[in-house]
């Protein structure tokens, strides 16, 4: 995957659960306005894999802030796209402030993940995108991890079909399929599903994302396909479906031991 910074740092987003047939109708609609994300070219359903390792406190404080509907909240996650040793890992902060979504992220080489999670900032040669905003994101990530005692809790994986504006990064429409969630309490950044559940069954998650004025054709798209807005929070809905048992101290200790046996040593060092 080509590494470029297409992150919408501040945006609004609308989410919908739809059938595969409706998702195909969405593709037909938006393909006349937006262009396909290059990462989806020549792939089934024009989709590329996304894996996110979500962090939370031992008491699942970030999970409960979402469940309780806190207006100002955040999530921390490590995002990656494959399990190749040379591929980057993105440390991401996703905040919700009232109705707006704010995102920050910094990318590092995979062998640096454990160092950052231990609270240290990598040297310049270990950064994938060595820009002030990315370094600031890593500093903020480390600070929040320490303050809230955050640890790996669950991995969310899915296939994403993304459509983007041909001239700027102000509009995105994404279709996420096969959304799964599994308990994951270690830094083993593999892509093998173990004990994963399908969060939304056979439904796809359609997200309409915009940074400026609400596009009128978004409303037409929603009307034409009978959309009903929902939360579709992959991490939170995944944990709700999994229940509390996989996140007990004993269960997490067993999982970490298994992950260490299966993970290549260079990833964990």
Image (spheres, rainbow, N blue to C red):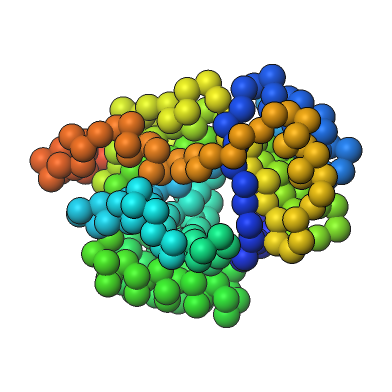
Q: Quadrant of the C terminus?
A: bottom left
Count the numbered circles shown.
0
Determine whether 130 is above or below 17 in the image.
below
Q: Which percent across, then down, holds residue 116?
A: 36, 67
Locate residue 221 relative to residue 66 in the image: left or right: right
Determine whether 76 is above or below 21 in the image.
below
Q: Which percent across, then down, holds residue 100?
A: 57, 62
Determine whether 2 is above or below 205 in the image.
below
Quarter of the view holding residue 49: top right
Considering every residue shown, the one lying at the far left of the view is 250
Locate residue 3 relative to residue 186 in the image: left or right: right
Residue 188 in sight from this viewpoint = no
Residue in front for this viewpoint, 167 or 88: 167
Considering every residue shown, the one lying at the far bottom of the view is 132
Residue drawn 73% across the image and 25% down it: 24
Quarter of the view holding residue 230: top right
Residue drawn 72% across the image and 37% down it: 222
Residue in front for this viewpoint, 160 or 211: 211
Residue 52 in sight from this viewpoint = yes
Q: Which percent across, then down, holds residue 185?
A: 26, 46
Residue drawn 81% across the image and 60% down it: 168
Locate residue 232 relative to residue 204 in the image: left or right: left
Q: Which percent across, then down, holds residue 102?
A: 55, 65
Residue drawn 34% across the image and 70% down it: 144
């Amino acid at each position: 995957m080509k590494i470029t910074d297409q992150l919408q740092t501040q945006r609004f987003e609308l989410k919908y659960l739809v059938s595969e047939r409706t998702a195909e109708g969405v593709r037909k609609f938006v393909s006349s306005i937006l262009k396909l994300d290059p990462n989806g070219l020549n792939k089934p359903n024009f989709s590329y894999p996304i894996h996110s390792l979500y962090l939370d406190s031992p008491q699942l404080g970030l999970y409960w802030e979402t469940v309780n509907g806190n207006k100002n909240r955040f999530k921390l996650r490590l995002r990656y796209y494959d399990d190749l040793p040379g591929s980057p890992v993105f440390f991401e902060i996703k905040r919700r402030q009232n109705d707006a979504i704010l995102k920050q992220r910094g990318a590092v080489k995979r062998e640096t993940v454990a160092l950052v999670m231990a609270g240290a900032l990598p040297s310049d040669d270990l950064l994938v995108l060595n820009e002030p905003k990315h370094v600031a994101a890593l500093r903020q990530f480390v600070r929040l991890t320490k303050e809230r005692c955050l640890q790996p809790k669950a991995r969310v994986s899915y296939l994403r079909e993304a459509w983007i504006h041909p001239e700027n990064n102000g509009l995105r429409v994404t279709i996420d399929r096969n959304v799964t969630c599994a308990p994951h309490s270690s830094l083993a950044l593999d892509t093998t599903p173990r004990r994963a559940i399908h969060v939304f069954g056979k439904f796809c998650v359609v997200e309409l994302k915009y940074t400026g004025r609400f596009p009128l054709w978004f409303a037409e798209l929603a009307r034409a396909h009978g959309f009903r807005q929902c939360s579709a929070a992959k991490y939170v809905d995944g944990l709700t479906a999994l229940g509390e048992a996989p996140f007990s101290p004993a269960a997490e200790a067993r999982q970490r031991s298994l992950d260490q046996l299966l993970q290549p040593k260079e990833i964990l060092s």
